[in-house]
Image: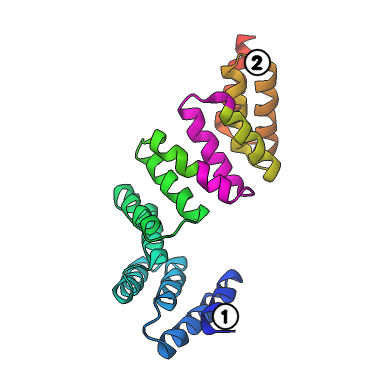
Amino acid sequence: MDKNQLGVQYMQEGNWEEAAKSFNEAIEENPNDPVAYINFGNVLSAVGDDEKALKFYQKAIEIDENSAAAYYSIGNLLFSKDLFNEAKNMFETAMKKGLNTSDNFFMLGLTLVQLNQGRFALPYLQRSVELNETDAEARFQYGLCLAQLELIDESMVQFTKCIELDPNHSDAYYNLGVSYAFKENGQKAIEMFNKALDIQPDHLLAGHAKKLIESNH
C-alpha cells in the first residue's frame, strides 16, 4: 500500500499522528505529487491548524494548478470561517477542474444557501443527493432549501427520506412538522414535533411550535 493510501487509512481511524507521518514520507519520496500535500493539509485542518493547512493546499496548486481537491479543501476551510463568497469561488473552481463529487456539489449548495441564493443552490444540492443517495444530511439540506423556496411537497419527500436514512434526525422531524402545519394538518404536525422532542427533549423550536398549534386547537 502506498504512503498516501496508508495515511488516508490512519485518517479514517482518527490516528492523526500516524497519518501525518505517512503523508510526510509520501512528500519526501515524491515532492511533486500534489495529492500528498492535500492529504497533509487535511490532517492539519482536522487538528485545527488551518493556517498551516492552507499552505499545503496552496503548495499542491503550485505543483499542479488543476488539483481540484485542493480547491475543494480550501473551500471547506473558508466555509468554516464564514467566508462564504471566497468559499463559493473555491468550490466552483474545484468543479471547473473536474471535481464532480457529491461532497463538492453539497458544499457549493450549502454555501449558496448561506449567501441567500437558494434558487442557485437547489440544483447543486439536488445533484449531491443524486450522486450519494444515502447521505441523510444532504437530503435534509436539500429539503430545507426546497422549503425555503416554498416547494413544500418536494421538501417533505426529502425530509421523509432523511428520516429513513437517519431515524434520529430531530430537525428533519421538526421541519416535517412545520410542513404539515403549513398544510393545516395540525394533528400530523404535532405528531412530528413529538417525534423531534422524543429524540431531542430540548428541541426549543419543536417545543414552541407544538405549544403554538395546541393553543390554536
Q: Position of residue 174 (x, y in %)?
A: 60, 31
Callout 2 environment at 10 Å: few (<14), some (14 to 19), or many (20+)? some
- Provide residue 206's location: percent of width, then percent of height: 59, 29
Residue 185 is labelled as 2
- Asked whether residue 148 appears in the rendered view, the answer is yes
Task: Give the mark toward the camera: 1 or 2.
Answer: 1
The numbered mark, 1 or 2, whose residue comes first in the sequence reads: 1
Name the residue at 60% across, 10% down. 216
For disc 1, the marked residue is 6
Mark 2 and mark 1 in contact (Cβ < 8 Å)?
no
Q: Secondary structure at mark 1?
A: helix
Tell which residue pokes out farthest to the top in this image: 217
Q: Which of the pair 85/201 is nearer the observer?
A: 85
In the image, residue 20 lies in the stretch drawn in magenta: no
Q: Which mark is residue 132?
A: none
User: Majority secondary structure of the magenta segment?
Assistant: helix
Residue type for callout 1: Leu
* Residue type of the residue flagged with mark 2: Asn
Mark 1, Cα crowd under 10 Å, few <14 / some 14-19 / many 20+, is: some
Quarter occupied by residue 12:
bottom right
Q: Which residues are magenta?
A: 126-153
Task: Residue 166: tell me if it is visible.
Answer: no
- State the separation of the CA atoms marked 1 and 2: 53 Å
Image-based side of 12 in relation to 105, left or right: right
Report the quarter where the C terminus lies. Answer: top right
Q: Secondary structure at mark 2?
A: loop
